[in-house]
Structures are given as structure tokens and as C-alpha cells.
Amino acid sequence: MSVRDALLDSKYDVARKATYLALDVADSAQAMRLVETFTPVVDGFKVGLELFHRAGMALVDELLRRDLRVFLDMKLHDIPNTVYGALRAICSSPIEMVNVHAQGGRHMLEKAREAVSASPYQPLLIGVTVLTSLSAEDLRQIGIADAPRDAVARLGKLCVDAGLDGVVCSAEELTTLSNCVPPTFERVVPGTRLATDDTHDQMRITTPVHAMATGATRLVLGRAIRDAADPMVALQRYWDEMMEGVHQSGTAT
């Protein structure tokens, strides 16, 4: 049996549902080559700022036409009415998840919630807490005295109070975050790496098994999979770790 066939087995369905593969490439042609490579093994993809600004909603619509799950990683951060209008436009399509910056403040987050709730489609609305590329020193330089885990906890509670569906955070903050958000709150974690992987520009990272064991509900997987010599083998290694983490957490179904 090939690795691809093995990954289609239902034993990986929990990992599959928890995965978004990041389409962090320069144009729609490259993005669609990745989609062709990874589907139907992977059914969830993240579209970020670079690709969206190059390819726009046409690419998103093509992914949706193929019945794929889309996380639109917009990190919206603007005045409340502008974020409201942007989300009303975005939510005219059946994407699965979209995010805003929690540091935009309570009023902005509440307007974001209002926009999604009033739209034809209502994706999961997720608040970005502290970018995984930021260290404690980076936070101090922009006037935030909190340690990253304390800032994440504070912003996570703000997202709960504003009615959001979850947060984006690093796996380092998951244990702290679990004390201040409901059990059903989504915890989306980018930047996980196997112990042998290059960390690239991520500062606060951990392994997939640790992330899932300590409360992550969804992982964004990127370069470590896309750029591997054998992407399917790399994906299997990640999914095996994710499934082990799920079993450790006691949430396997």
C-alpha cells in the first residue's frame, strides 16, 4: 500500500479534520499544483495574505467548488466598521474559518461577530492573539509588558467575551489558555514542527503531538510538509504525531 493510500484510511480522519495545509505560495498556479498533489488526502487549506492579494476570491471559489475546507487567514485589524464590512463581503462564500486580530479591541471583535452572524454563511470566527513569530522581547518593544502566555490568556478571554469561536495561538500557551476559555473553544495552532525540523521564522513552537495533547483543535501545517523531499511521508509523520497527541488528551473519537 502506498503512503497516499494509507493516509486515506479512516484512522487518520481526526487528524485530517484538524489540518489546514498552508498555501503560502506566490500565485494561484502554484497553489493549485499543491491542491492537486495533496487532495483527496488533505481536504482543508489555508489561504493567507500573499496568495489572497495575488489570486483573490477566484482562487477561494475554486477551492470551494472542489468541496474543500477553506481557512481564510486575513488577520483583519482595522476600525470596527471596516472589519464589519470586510467580513460581510468574505462571508458571502461558504468558507470554514476566518480570523481577526484580537488586539483590535472589544468593539472591533463584537462588530466582527455581528458581521458573521448576519451573513449568508457563518464561518468559525477566530481571534489572533500573539503571532508565533513574536518573542517576549518583541512584545516589550511594542509596549506589551506581559509574557506571551499572559498576553494570550488575556486576549483569549477577550475573544470569549466578544463571542468569537476560538483563537490562534502557539502551542506554548495552550495549557494556560485552557484555564480561561470554554472546552469547546477552538484553539488553532500554527508553527508546529517535528523535533528534527527547521523552525524557520517561528519563535514559540512545539511538536504536533504536544500541541494536540495539550488542547489544540486544529493545526496549520506548512513548509515542513510542502518542501519535504517526500511530502506524503512528511504528512504521515505529522499525522501519526497528531493522532498520538489526540489519544494522550483523551479526546479521540
Image (cartoon, rainbow, N blue to C red):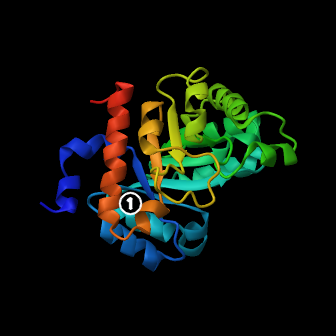
Left/right placement of residue 43 relative to residue 119 reads: left
Q: Residue at x 39, y 73 (%)?
A: 32
- Rendering coords of residue 207 (x, y %): 47, 44
Q: Residues within 10 Å of mark 1 (few under 14, many from 20)?
A: some
Left/right placement of residue 30 relative to residue 154 reads: left
Quarter assignment of residue 199 = bottom right
Left/right placement of residue 41 relative to residue 82 reads: left
Check disc 1 and report its element: helix, strand or loop.
Answer: helix
Q: Nearer the viewer, residue 82 or 229?
A: 229
Quarter assignment of residue 156 = top right
Q: Is residue 128 visible?
A: yes
Q: Residue at x 44, y 69 (%)?
A: 227
Residue identifier under label 1: 64
Q: Is residue 66 visible?
A: no
- Rendering coords of residue 178 (x, y %): 55, 24
Left/right placement of residue 36 relative to residue 141 reads: left
- Rendering coords of residue 190 (x, y %): 53, 49
Q: Residue at x 43, y 32 (%)?
A: 213
